[in-house]
Image (spheres, rainbow, N blue to C red):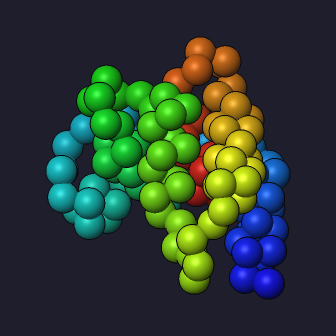
Amino acid sequence: MLRTIALTLMTLIATTLVGCGATPMIAAGPTEPAAALAKAPQGDRVLVFATMELKKFDSNRDGFLSQAEYVAARFADLRFVTAPTAAETATIKAGLAKKFTGMDLNRDKKLTPVEFRADFV
């Protein structure tokens, strides 16, 4: 039952609508997350948060998220009561890869902070 709930949750996440038309903002300035969020205008707070999260997940430090980085980071965030089977793991990772493809608006196989923002709205 818990596996079904986890798979259902992943399916819902994977089918989330993308895009909300926010004005892009370059996150330069305070490096402390609370300070950056406090200084950002209300509409840009999600983008500031997305930029900070992207930096955490960006394992090769190129300023973008590859599909492999995204899937690995999001899969690592999941918590299971029992370990998923290989088939369940493959299904979850396929759903995450599909979500990545939906967020990659310019189809360059990497997410910018603006594209990654869709993961939080």
Where on the picture, by quarter, is residue 40? bottom left
Is residue 30 visible in the rendered structure shown here? yes
Q: Is residue 3 left or right of residue 82?
A: right
Q: Measuring 66% from the left and 39% from the top, which residue is drawn there?
A: 97
Quarter of the picture containing the N terminus is bottom right
Position in image of residue 24 (x %, y %) = 50, 35
Quarter of the picture containing the C terminus is bottom right
Position in image of residue 41 (x %, y %) = 43, 55
Q: Is residue 35 left or right of residue 44?
A: left
Position in image of residue 66 (x %, y %) = 49, 29
Q: Measuring 35% from the left and 37% from the top, which residue is drawn there?
A: 58
Residue 25 in the image: above or below residue 75 = above
Q: Measuring 18% from the left and 58% from the top, which residue is drawn there?
A: 32
Q: Is residue 95 left or right of residue 50?
A: right
Q: Is residue 90 left or right of residue 68?
A: right
Q: Measuring 68% from the left and 26% from the top, which residue is drawn there?
A: 105
Residue 14 in the image: above or below residue 21 = below
Disc tally is: 0
Is residue 19 visible in the rendered structure shown here? no
- Residue extending farthest to the front is 86
Choose between 115 and 30: the one closer to the eye. Answer: 115
Choose between 34 and 41: the one closer to the eye. Answer: 34
Position in image of residue 9 (x %, y %) = 74, 68
Where on the picture, by quarter, is residue 37? bottom left
